[in-house]
Image (spheres, rainbow, N blue to C red):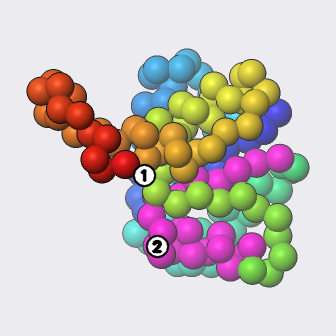
Amino acid sequence: MKQLILISHGNFCVELKKSAEMIMGPQENIHAVPLLPEDGQGDFLNKFNETVKDMDDYVVFADLMGGTPANTVSKEIMRGKKIQLYAGVNLPMVIEFVNSTMINQSSTYVDVAKDGIVNVNDVIAGNDDDEDE
């Protein structure tokens, strides 16, 4: 089964997993690897590698493009590791991962992430948002 690795500054990834589980139930195939204040890049890489060491099929969602977690995994990709990495994770992406994994279907996580961002005031007011697309 495909695995999801959430990586972030601090415990954002841990709490994001908990939030997804609040909605979708326990998720054994989602793993969180936080970069903690006391961690250096090497410490984070060691935690990441320990998490994925027995995995063949996984995708990585990072909190922030250009941050240490994403940069560390990006360097692994540049060294030749076959890792699918997305930056800018949000809860709709994680839920989409769960849903697409359950039905064994591929997903366009970037589109799901973008579509999850809406101006609720415009929705309530019934404003047409087609101009922004």
Residue 32 in view, yes or no = no
The answer to which image quadrant residue 122 occupies is top left
Residue mark closest to the camera, 1 vs 2: 2
Task: Point out residue 3 in the picture as x, y percentages from the top left corner.
Answer: 73, 41
Q: Which residue is mark 2?
A: 67
Q: Quadrant of the N terminus?
A: top right
Along the polypeptide, which appears first: circle 1 or circle 2? 1
Q: Which mark is residue 38?
A: none
The answer to which image quadrant residue 94 occupies is top right
The one of 55 and 96 positioned closer to us in this rendering: 96
The one of 35 and 81 positioned closer to us in this rendering: 81
Find out whether the residues at labels 1 and 2 contact each other: C-beta distance under 8 Å: no
Q: How many other residues sit within 10 Å of disc 1, few (<14), some (14-19) or many (≥20)?
A: some
The answer to which image quadrant residue 45 occupies is bottom right
- As shown in the figure, which amino acid type bears the numbered disc 2? Gly
Task: Point out residue 125 in the picture as x, y percentages from the top left corner.
Answer: 12, 27
Span of residues in magenta: 57-77
Q: Residue at x 46, y 57 (%)?
A: 88
Q: Residue at x 68, y 29 (%)?
A: 100
Q: Residue at x 82, y 70 (%)?
A: 81
Q: Which residue is mark 1?
A: 11
109 is higher (above) or lower (below) than 60: above
- As shown in the figure, which amino acid type bears the numbered disc 1? Asn
The answer to if 60 sits in the magenta stretch is yes
User: In terms of secondary structure, where does tag 2 sit?
Assistant: loop
Task: Point out residue 110 in the picture as x, y percentages from the top left corner.
Answer: 54, 50
Residue 115 in view, yes or no = yes
Compute the Cα span from label 1 to label 2: 14 Å
The answer to if 19 sits in the magenta stretch is no
Side of 57 where 130 appears, left or right:
left
